[in-house]
Amino acid sequence: MTNETETEQTPEHVPMMQQILDNPFLLLFLGVTIPTVLYILWGVMEVASIPLAD
Amino acid sequence: MTAETVVGVGRRAAAADFRTCPYTGLKVDAAAQTLIKANAVAAVVFLLIGGLMGLLVALTRWPAVHLLPADWFYLVLTGHGANVLLFWIIFFEIAVLYFASAVLLNCRLPAPKFAWLGFALMVVGAIITNVVVLQGESSVMFTSYPPMMAKPNFYLGLILFAVGALIGCAIFFATLAIAKQERTYEGSIPLVTFGALTAAIIAVFTIASGAIILIPTWLWSLGLIGEIDPLMYKVVWWAMGHSSQQINVSAHVSIWYMVGALLLGAKPLSEKVSRTAFFLYILFLQLASAHHLLAEPGLTASWKIVNTSYMMYLAVLGSMIHGLTVPGSIEAAQRKNGYDKGVFEWLRKAPWGNPAFAGMFLSLVMFGFIGGISGVVLGTEQLNVLMHNTIYVPGHFHGTVVTGTTLAFMAGTYLVLPLIFQREIVWPKLAKIQPYLFGIGAAGISLFMMGAGTLGVARRHWDITFSDAELSFAHSAGAFLMMGLNGVFAILAALGGAIYVLVVVGTVLFGKKITAGHKLTFPLHAGGGAAVSQYGSHATTKLPGTIVLVAIFFVCFVLYYFINWKYLSELWLFR
Ligand code: HEM
Ligand SMILES: [Cu+2]
């Protein structure tokens, strides 16, 4: 890659969706956060809020 | 390549030792190559152990044979689940991760010593768990629900194994970062690597969830913690248990694309569409974990429905996309290769004698028809009650992890042997029939377990005659027949599995070393190396064959879905 093509590849020229898909660590963040919130945290809160029998 | 890239590569060349693959033109880092070999060999060893255990389980559940006594049945069933579902699959997946990062990106594998540490932890963990299972008193099945308690080392082995696998994922991410920094590829990573990235992301969530739940459970079995709440356990455990299946799906879909590319020069129909499908997996696939808890009273309908319906269908959409684009890309490639007559010449003239292709295509078809359709039915809250905890459930997941993942990994092995081990496959005639034998056997066990489950046979049950029950109960003759047929097909599947192990071990030990100019018994496409490692689509919509196949799939899907609703409506009368 020469310097010209490098400047051509500045973020403005790459479509937003492609930028997201080209960023493995952003994907990692999304892929861990979404299930942690929707499945684990929400699920655990529901279980924790079941009243105890006495 | 420009001067700068060459300099970048050159600077590192001292640290890494590359060879160039004569068939694909890819640069293969020696450390990555050895690690891929080690992980693949370990995978096959555990498949052998676990597969044998599967056969013993199936022979016990064959009423006329009823091979093992009850305590051994549960012991072997526990060992079967752990060895095949965890050890075979995850060792192979680590090999896939190293291949898809270092090899496909022409990059060195950073910190190979660390990768070996991960491998060692995985081996030690798998051995510890196997030993403790075989000692008895840990027959808790691979789900290990409390209050059933295994010996502490059962959990410890799994934890060590998981830490080792996490190291493998870390090495994968590090390789992506280094490849980008050292500019060993241009533009976006190849689709197969993107699929592997999807698998690795899901793996991180899977392993973290596993640690969150298995570490306290281990402490509990050591007596350091008073109790583990069973429902809490189930919620967190399934974040691991289900998500690990989604690592498998992502990995085997990548292998489908890889086999298509290497053997036929197939490029995705649209990089954008296929990547979006993987992106849907990253976002939504793991939420489907909730389908394992549909019958639990302690969780609300909102939690269940949001996770298993709204969100999960977006992930199913991802699978539907792959189900269209994988055969579509193969059709497009074959038409370009000259098989352009009629609707199905491309499929008829496909390399059916090449076990990599045969295994891959059978995996694709059976994963969709058997595992996929039954999975959506089971994952629907209302329909789930029809089959919950029956042997329909193992029927369904043998359709996914055996006919889907395992068969795809077997297919991939027929490429790993010549390209990474650099050995010519021994006994090619046996290798040719292997995917068919294993595929038919695995399809049989899936379908007959599903059939028996529909008739009410329970899963994980040693005695379907209820011989010592206070109140007698008799299953229909059909249910017994199904369990017998399951046993017959289990023998076929085991035979197919044994041939696979034989061919792999034979090739690794005695296969002819591949030297320059050697012509492969099962040849690759001339443009395969480029197709698998470069970004690019084969945009076409002239895919009549694929459209017919997809239409057949949808008709089956819709019919089966409605049959189950009809069946439910007959059981569930509102009067
Ligand atoms: C020779 C091939 C195989 C045969 C004959 C076989 C047969 C069986 C049978 C009969 C069951 C017991 C069902 C029950 O009683 O509940 C079972 C369970 C299971 N199988 Fe297989 N299987 C094979 C290969 C595999 C493979 C390759 C995998 C994974 C990749 C797998 C994963 C499992 C799992 C996870 C269970 C559930 C264990 C449990 O309930 O704890 N099987 N298998
Ligand atoms: Cu699941």
Image (cartoon, rainbow, N blue to C red):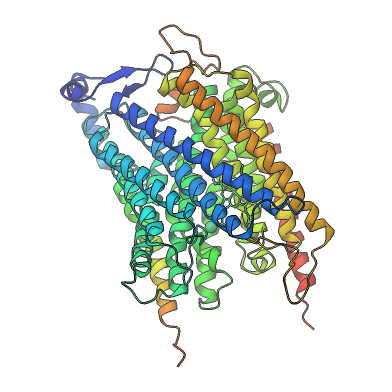
Name the residue: 53% across, 44% down.
B50
Query: Residue most toward the bottom?
Result: A54
Q: Quadrant of residue B193?
A: top left
**In this rendering, is residue B223 above or below B488?**
below
Left or right of residue B529, residue B182 in this image: left
Q: Residue B61: x, y in percent?
A: 69, 54
Q: Nearer the viewer, residue B554 or B87?
A: B87
Would residue B209 be found to the left or right of residue B494 on screen? left
Q: Position of residue B30 (x, y in %)?
A: 30, 24
Q: Position of residue B348 (x, y in %)?
A: 70, 24
Report the quarter where the N terminus of chain B lies.
top left
Closer to us: B162 or B275: B162
Question: What residue appears at the point 70 percent right and 54 percent down from the top-left corner?
Answer: B450
x, y (%) of residue B301?
55, 75
Instruction: Please say whether residue B399 is visible from this viewpoint.
Output: no
Q: Can residue B21 be spotted in the picture?
A: yes
As drawn, B105 above or below B231 = above
Quarter of the image with the C terminus of chain B in it: bottom right
| Camera-side residue of B382 and B508 | B508
Q: Is residue B211 left or right of residue B322?
A: left
Which residue lies at the image location 38% right of the left edge and 70% below the top edge?
A: A41
Q: Is residue B171 left or right of residue B39?
A: left
Residue in the image at 74% along x and 77% along y: B470
Residue extending furthest toward the top: B517
Taking depth in this image into account, of B501 and B105 the one nearest to the observer is: B501
